[in-house]
Amino acid sequence: MKKTLAPLRSLVGLAIVGLASAAAQAGEIAVIVKTTNSTFWQNVNKGADAAIKSLKGHTMTFSGPASESAIADQVGMVENAVNRKVAGIVLAPSDPDALVPAIKKAWEARIPVVLIDSMVSDAGKPYYQSFLATDNRLAGELCAKQLIAKVGTTGKIAVMSYVAGAGSEIGRVGGFRDYIARHSKLQIVGPFYSQSQMATALNQTTDVLASNPDLKGLFGANEPTAVGMGRALVQSGKTGKVVAVGFDGNEDLQKFVKDGTLEAIAVQGSYQMGELGVKTLADVMAGRKVAKFVDTGVVMVGKGNIDKPEAKNVLY
């Protein structure tokens, strides 16, 4: 067994060295996100752009589908990046399974891949070098804790989610639901999936509020969903009557916190994801050791801290 493992370890080591040396040459870094139609992902772009300026000789492209549910389009973008022989890829995968064959192609082409925001399934673990994201389960738990503190442990709440099966959604909503189940007797209505479309979330939330007049709380699990949820509360005259917690921190959501439409928002370090994603990829390309997982953090923002540095550092 020892004789068999020794050459195998040597081959693995050579593969890693080969991956780094092949990518170390200056070239294009492709940053591919879930959609470009979101201020969250535009903030990721800002962070990535800041990082690329410190890397001599490298250029950066930023792309994503028209919507988070356009998974086949994102797969095509990764495959296209592989075909044009980019130096490396920073990827926010929209689906944990569908992107695995594409990042395998990158690995076979000796193109390093760093994931941000969402994980791929276990089948894809050999094909990426690092994963940077919010601890989504913890973030979901923090949102549940915030909601329980305001609505109590009995009654009815609704979960307004985005794309079923997305890695971040599984952790975020899963963490929220598990915490609710462990620490309360609250009944959960949903989840409802907006496909990350604000207008869809608005309509879904309006329907939920109308069909559940005794609803005590709402959880909006990403930026467009939380914005739609907030607008539905305002239009339905439910501001201050139904407690709502959202996710992410664009200007609309900040306004909802300040006027009391939302009790709080869980804000991810989107700028940090872009910046650290590119810097981590640069380390891989230089042959430096990187962590397999990096927690980019989350800050719960409410009226009490929205104007403090801890919140301003992550709001966008």
Image (cartoon, rainbow, N blue to C red):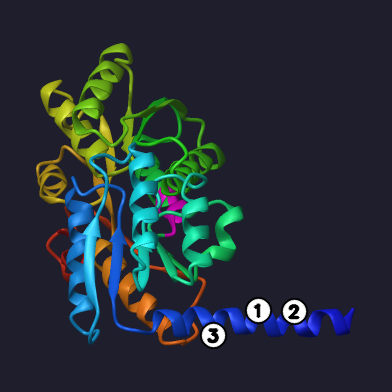
Q: Which residue is mark 1?
A: 12
Q: Considering the image in quadrants, where does the C terminus appear?
A: bottom left
Alpha-carbon span between mark 3 and mark 2: 14 Å
Q: Position of residue 270 (x, y in %)?
A: 26, 61
Q: Is residue 122 magenta?
A: no
Residue lying at 22% horizontally and 70% vertically, measured from the top left: 60
- Secondary structure category for the residue under label 1: helix
Nearest the eye: 88 or 186? 88
Give the image quarter of residue 269.
Answer: bottom left
Residue 243, compared with residue 94, is above or below; it is: above
Q: Position of residue 302 (x, y in %)?
A: 21, 52
Q: What residue type is disc 3 on?
A: Val
> How many C-alpha atoms fall within 10 Å of the one at disc 2: few (<14), some, or many (≥20)?
few
Residue lying at 51% horizontally and 66% vertically, measured from the top left: 107
Q: Which residue is mark 3?
A: 17
Region rendered in magenta: 135-141
Q: Which residue is mark 2?
A: 8
Q: What residue type is disc 2 on?
A: Leu
Residue 302 seen in the figure: no
